[in-house]
Image (spheres, rainbow, N blue to C red):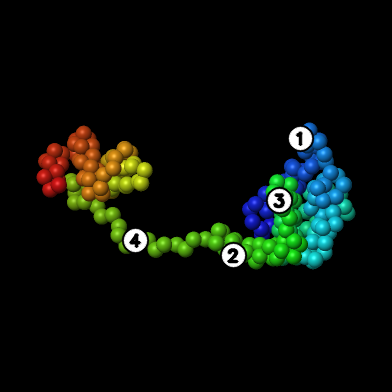
């Protein structure tokens, strides 16, 4: 269904009989009365969404009466299955109207407020128009970012190349990372470290270089080269 995720979740609860209408709550001994707040009939899912007077007027005025023939369907699952032959826009509007009716029902129960029918129908129209832009914004594939023209270049034969970087987080975490490769591009070692520190970027960069050189010396990559780089720092 081309509707908002919350509306799809609502329809899933309708089909699985897990929508907390008063009949179900009364069966589970969570409320004492199972009658509808708008009339004196038992509040089932079908009644709450399609059957009391105000709701019947909403379905008629919206032009979505084809989606609410629940008594003919026999069950909510059968009703939803019968929607497969309907126009996609009509189905979309019908689902959003049912979702809006359920929200209106909850607003009356928990806040004691009601919304005029014309305002509720206008809200459904806005939702229907907004579904398209929502889907495009959420589900459209992100534009591919052109790859950088920079590429890794191998060092001369007999030289080990160290690539390193540091990252700073607002929470005071610093991340250090280094990778060493030879002239053939083979990875000799890679290491990361995360620590609590409030360093400026220059200090963080110096720390990751120091870490790279220390690990290189531990791996036997040559004291002479390490000392030479250290002097440049």
Callout 2–callout 4 Cβ contact below 8 Å: no
Label 2–label 3 contact, CB within 8 A: no
Residue bearing the label numbered 3: 107
Q: Earlier in the sequence, mark 1 or mark 3?
A: 1
Q: Is residue 169 above or below residue 29?
A: below
| Earlier residue among tags 2 and 3 | 3
Q: CA distance from mark 3 to mark 4?
A: 53 Å
Can see residue 91? no
Q: Nearer the viewer, residue 95 or 208?
A: 95
Q: CA distance from mark 2 to mark 1?
A: 40 Å
CA gap, disc 2 and disc 3: 27 Å
Give the mark, 3 or 4, whose residue is nearer the N terminus: 3
Residue 82 pos. (x, y %):
80, 56
Q: Which residue is mark 1?
A: 30
138, above or below 44, in the image: below
For label 4, the residue is 148
Q: Which residue is tagged 2?
A: 133
Q: Position of residue 114 (x, y in %)?
A: 73, 55
Which residue: 31% across, 38% down?
A: 196
Q: On screen, 172 above or below 92?
A: above
Identify the secondary structure beneath mark 2: helix
Few, some or many residues within 10 Å of mark 4 (<14, 14–19, 20+): few
Is residue 45 among the parts visible in the rendering?
yes
Marks 1 and 4: CB-CB under 8 Å?
Answer: no
């Amino acid at each position: 269904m081309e509707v908002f995720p919350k509306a799809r979740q609502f329809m899933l609860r309708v089909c699985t009989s897990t929508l907390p209408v008063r009949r179900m709550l009364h069966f589970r001994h969570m409320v004492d009365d199972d009658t509808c707040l708008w009339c004196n009939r038992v509040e089932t899912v079908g009644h709450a969404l399609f059957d009391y007077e105000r709701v019947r007027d909403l379905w008629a005025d919206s032009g979505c009466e084809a989606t609410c023939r629940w008594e003919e369907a026999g069950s909510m699952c059968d009703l939803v299955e019968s929607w497969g032959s309907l126009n996609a826009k009509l189905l979309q509007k019908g689902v959003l109207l049912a979702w809006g009716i359920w929200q209106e029902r909850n607003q009356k129960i928990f806040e004691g407020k009601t919304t005029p029918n014309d305002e509720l129908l206008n809200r459904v129209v806005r939702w229907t128009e907004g579904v398209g832009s929502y889907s495009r914004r959420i589900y459209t594939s992100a534009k591919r970012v052109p790859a950088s023209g920079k590429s890794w270049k191998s060092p001369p034969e007999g030289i080990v190349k160290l690539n390193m970087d540091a990252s700073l987080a607002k929470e005071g975490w610093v991340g250090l990372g280094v990778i060493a490769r030879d002239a053939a591009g083979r990875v000799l070692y890679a290491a990361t470290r995360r620590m609590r520190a409030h360093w400026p970027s220059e200090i963080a960069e110096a720390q990751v270089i120091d870490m790279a050189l220390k690990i290189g010396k531990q791996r036997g990559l040559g004291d002479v080269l390490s000392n030479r780089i250290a002097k440049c720092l």
